[in-house]
Image (tube, rainbow, N blue to C red):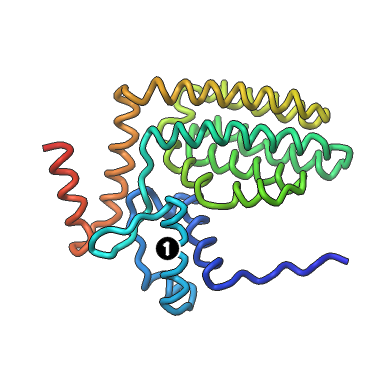
Amino acid sequence: MTAKKRKPTAVQLVIETIMSRIKEGRYIPGQYLIAGDLMEELKLSKAPVREAIHVLVGEGVIELLQNRSARIRSLSMDELIDFSEVWAAIGGVNVRLAADSMKLKANQARVKQALKPILESEKTKNGANYFAAVSNFHLILSEISGNTYITQMVNRSNFGHFYRHISGIYPGTHWRRHVDAFQKITVTILAGKGDTAERIYRKHMQWVIAHLKTAQGEPQGRLLVFTNFIRGFLVNLKPGLIQHDLIIINRLFC
């Protein structure tokens, strides 16, 4: 008998809503969160919204400013590199475990279906779509393997937050390399060759990390940080919220 899925608590609902909107691009780095808007949309009191924000502050997704406002935290290039190094290991385990569950045709069909949006993203050259597809690919694999810990990691904060940042420079001019890597990974998963799939994935991530490190001190790396900052600034064009940003702009560029 299948256990009923528990209804999320009010705090979990707020967290899931915020993280989902980050993945979808509705919330971008630097954007302020208006507690009142969340309370109204989700029909919740102030307490669970405030608690959820504090949870995400602890996870590094949201930052609290001196005027008590909250906004989606912008990640530095160092943080993007650090996350990539960690995810190279986690993602590698994820593809290996999924390969062990390929005897069921239903699982094979899910993996093939999950690959399609990654392939299609090359046609549109849309970085956000590509990373949303990759995120979903990892989620499907974790569900197939039944590893709840990896599923939680994919679903939660830093994975979507990372992708939302890095989509500004990736895949860039390297679409074919990224798509080819996931095609090879998928083929080996479907063949049940978990160790090979993990090796291919880790090798691909090593290339990504090397590329990020190269870009770190170059114009495209600085442009990524600047672009994320400006996008967040523009979406916050409310007199009571932008004073802090104006001070930072003055320090950085004046």
Looking at the image, residue 1 sits to the left or right of residue 47; the answer is right
> In percent of the image, x 62 and y 25: which residue is there?
202
> In percent of the image, x 39 and y 50: which residue is there?
28
Closer to us: 37 or 207: 207
The quarter of the rendered structure image containing the N terminus is bottom right
Position above or below: 96 against 152: above
Under circle 1, the secondary element is helix
Position above or below: 206 against 36: above
Position above or below: 53 against 89: below
Furthest residue to the front? 58
Closer to us: 227 or 57: 57
User: Within the image, what quadrant is residue 80 found in?
Assistant: top left
Residue 82: image location, x then y, percent: 47, 34
User: Within the image, what quadrant is residue 144 found in?
Assistant: top right
Residue 227: image location, x then y, percent: 31, 38
How many numbered discs, if any? Answer: 1
User: Within the image, what quadrant is residue 54 found in?
Assistant: bottom left
Instruction: Give the amino acid type for the residue marked by disc 1 in the picture.
Output: His
Residue 15: image location, x then y, percent: 51, 62
> In percent of the image, x 53 and y 39: which residue is there?
131
Closer to us: 115 or 45: 45
Q: Which residue is mark 1?
A: 54
Q: Residues within 10 Å of mark 1 (few under 14, many from 20)?
A: some
> In percent of the image, x 49 and y 25: which residue is there?
209
